[in-house]
Image: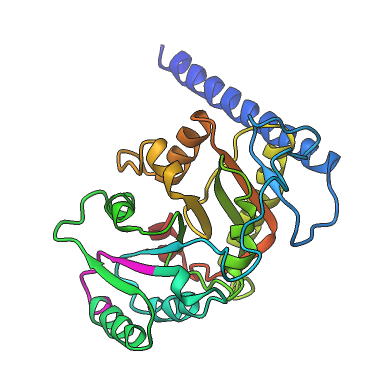
């Protein structure tokens, strides 16, 4: 009897893996069918909004950010927890954005329990003295972890758009000017950029991580677009329209994949995700196995 049970479990597992591989193969076929040279203007769009052959009628319907007077207000959220080694670099990067200073604000959603708190406080005071709108937000109870921090931070945001970065990212100065113009239609709710890796060649662990992520951001994301399937916000290096977050029900901490969960809820509500394969956002990969396991 035990042998039959083991055989049944083994068969179900093989069937599951086979179905998954067939689905991935379909994405690869869709990607290769429409493969072309990527430029910074390449835009990939989620399903459900009339896309045909990778071209959406949304593009070009509205001009955003043609000059300093038309750039919209953006809130930058940095949800962190004990990131003393990298948080200073991230704060320096977002304050260096080539964007009108009076058109963006920075909220560091700091749930840290170590010296990160003091490091962030010093950075905030430094940039506040130089005219930046930057705040350190502390919660008494770290409820909901990252999703909870983003949920509690949303009502504070004065911007119509909310950019989110994890602590290990180092966005380039032109990030906002390359992404905000793609909110050129009222139903574009998310703009996601491709992750890049500043330490890809450090070790075999970083090279393997980079390979897996590169497959996702090329074959999977582009393949989903070409197959007219849902796209996803990857948790960082992207921008949300604030009203989209609110209409989709906000951040929920009842799942480990709050970014995917909110992405699907938003698209089920008729919102649209734009993926920019040609716009990269550099980040540092975990360099050893325990750090990688902790991040995942």
Frontmost residue, 266 versus 9: 266
Is residue 208 in view? no
Instruction: Write down the quadrant of residue 56 in the picture.
Output: top right
Q: Is residue 84 left or right of residue 293?
A: left
Query: x%, y% of residue 121?
Result: 26, 80
Query: x%, y% of residue 21?
Result: 67, 33
What residue range appears in magenta? 106-116
**From what the image shows, is residue 85 above or below residue 245?**
below
Frontmost residue, 20 versus 262: 262
Frontmost residue, 83 versus 134: 134
Residue furthest front in the image: 69
Q: Is residue 114 magenta?
A: yes
Q: Is residue 158 left or right of residue 103?
A: left
Residue visible at 25% across and 64% down?
Answer: 111
Location of the C terminus (image quadrant): bottom left
Location of the N terminus (image quadrant): top left
């Amino acid at each position: 009897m035990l042998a039959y049970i083991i055989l049944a479990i083994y068969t179900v597992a093989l069937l599951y893996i086979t179905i998954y591989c067939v689905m991935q193969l379909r994405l690869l076929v869709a990607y290769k069918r429409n493969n072309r040279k990527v430029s910074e203007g390449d835009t990939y769009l989620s399903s459900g909004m009339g896309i045909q052959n990778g071209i959406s009628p949304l593009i070009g319907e509205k001009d955003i950010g043609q000059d300093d007077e038309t750039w919209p207000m953006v809130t930058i959220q940095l949800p962190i927890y004990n990131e003393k080694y990298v948080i200073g670099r991230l704060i320096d990067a977002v304050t260096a954005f080539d964007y009108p200073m009076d058109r963006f604000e920075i909220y560091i959603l700091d749930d840290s329990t170590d010296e990160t708190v003091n490091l962030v406080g010093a950075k905030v005071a430094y940039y506040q003295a130089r005219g930046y709108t930057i705040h350190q937000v502390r919660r008494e109870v770290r409820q909901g972890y990252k999703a909870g921090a983003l949920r509690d931070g949303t009502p504070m945001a004065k911007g119509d758009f909310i950019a989110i970065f994890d602590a290990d990212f180092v966005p380039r100065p032109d990030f906002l000017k390359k992404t905000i113009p793609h909110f050129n239609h009222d139903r574009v709710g998310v703009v996601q950029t491709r992750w890049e890796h500043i330490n890809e060649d450090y070790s075999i662990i970083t090279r393997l991580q980079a390979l897996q992520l590169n497959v996702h951001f090329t074959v999977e994301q582009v393949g989903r677009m070409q197959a007219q399937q849902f796209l996803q916000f990857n948790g960082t290096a992207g921008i949300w329209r604030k009203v989209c977050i609110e209409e989709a029900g906000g951040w929920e901490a009842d799942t480990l994949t709050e970014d995917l969960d909110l992405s699907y809820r938003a698209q089920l509500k008729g919102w649209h995700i734009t993926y920019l394969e040609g716009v990269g956002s550099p980040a540092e990969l975990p360099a050893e196995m325990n750090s990688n396991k902790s991040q995942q």
